Image (cartoon, rainbow, N blue to C red):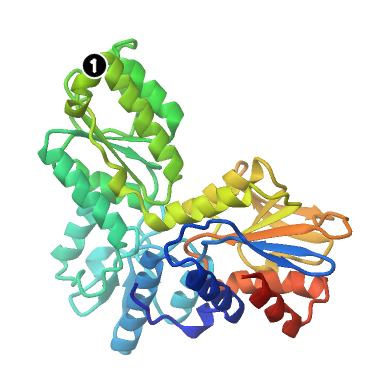
Amino acid sequence: MKQFQIPKYYRSPIISHIKLLRKENDRRKKDFSPTRLEFKNVTFLISRHFGFCFGVENAIEIAYKALSDNPNKQIYLLSQMIHNPIVNDDLTQRGVKFLQDTSGNSLINIKKLNKNDIVLIPAFGVSIETEAKLKNQDIDIKTYNTTCPFVEKVWKRSKKLGEDKHTIIIHGKKNHEESKATFSRSLQNAPTLIIKDLKDAKKLSDFINGNNKKEDFFEVFKGCYSKGFNITTDLNKIGVVNQTTMLASETQAITEYLKKVMMEKYGIENINDHIADTRDTLCYATNDNQSSTYAMLNNEVDLAIVVGGYNSSNTSHLVELLENKIHTFFIKSEDEIISKQEIQHFDIHEKKILRTLNFIPEKTKPVIAFTSGASCPDSVIENVIRKFIDFYNIDEKCLFEIINQSI
């Protein structure tokens, strides 16, 4: 796999060492169990896969190349390149300006730009409508386009599905930049609908089977369907693709559920005429990170720390998986760990910052698990782990000896 040129301060000697050893011992990625580091007074479990994925490293390399190539030009980011505040703050401190916020609201009028300005397209991609506005200003959007290749793969698959007369069902969040970009492209070739989860899929099945009034569809899925959507004709042949940061297991569950619905309606012998096999659109990195998190749940863990941007969809899903079994805290950096007795963290359900006292279990030898989202730098999770290294007085030399012995 390609080695990207990203700033060294995003790398980590501890994490890089662990990842290298795991890769050497498991080149075919068959083992998703966490790295277990046993110290005298604490055990650390470090997820098998976490941190920067291919798409994120690709985006960061392109963004910093743009800065290097254009020292005297104004550089803009369409919106947050990735959902990590540390990376985005570093870019803005270097003079990069955002054209939009994450909801698509304008911060700088695109009409004020000229052909000499540099615009970075974020890893989530760009909608066709916004792309057209930039082109109308003679802006070059190809040279520094950081759209993730796996997002583009979903777009290509959607295009093919549309050409084959499928209606596209997008498993995603309707206000997420990536889903907006996918939706804008999909509807060029096919009727398109965004559903958030399995609950939405079950609601959709009632309309597929004719159990609900047709007019109710437009209220239930308000803001999620393409113009002119016809539930009489557009739900007979479907294909499911996803926002790549969603839970891969949920996308698969939605697809299997809708496949069963189609089997019951049209018969198993006709199923291939009514729902497409779209397993090839799932992002490998999201899948690996989530599989590693599931593997973490096979262990007895007292505390889990998840590190990443609070608006990061893929990171939030890791929190969802862990918190069902483990006392879990979602933090954006080591600064959120105020002391061994107090932590500041994000509640993904209430969407607010909380403070918790005595968050580390009082045990002789607690087991603490660590993971991070696909947009979190390894250096950030290292700094988090180092906080716990200090709490438990672990010697640096001892740390690397344990790592080498454990992997």
Q: What residue is drawn where x is 54% and y is 77%? A: 16
Residue 215 spot, x, y in % from top left: 29, 16
- Look at label 1 and name its amino acid: Gly
Residue 284 spot, x, y in % from top left: 38, 56
Is residue 209 shown to the viewer in this render? yes
Is residue 351 shown to the viewer in this render? no
Figure check: 401 above or below 55: below
Does 84 sit left or right of 105 as displayed? right
Give the structural element (helix, strand or loop) at label 1. loop
Task: From the viewer's side, name the closer residue of 52 and 180.
Answer: 52
In the rendered view of the protein, which quadrant contains the C terminus?
A: bottom right
The residue labelled by disc 1 is: 267
Residue 348 spot, x, y in % from top left: 59, 46
Figure check: 340 above or below 321: below
Crowdedness of circle 1 by 10 Å Cα count: few (<14), some, many (20+)?
few
Q: How many callouts does the rendering have?
A: 1
Does 248 sit left or right of 269 as displayed? right
Q: What residue is drawn where x is 53% and y is 69%? A: 22
In the rendered view of the protein, which quadrant contains the N terminus?
A: bottom left
Q: Quadrant of residue 399?
A: bottom right
Task: From the viewer's side, name the closer residue of 213 and 277.
Answer: 277
Figure check: 368 above or below 203: below
Q: What residue is drawn where x is 71% and y is 64%? A: 44
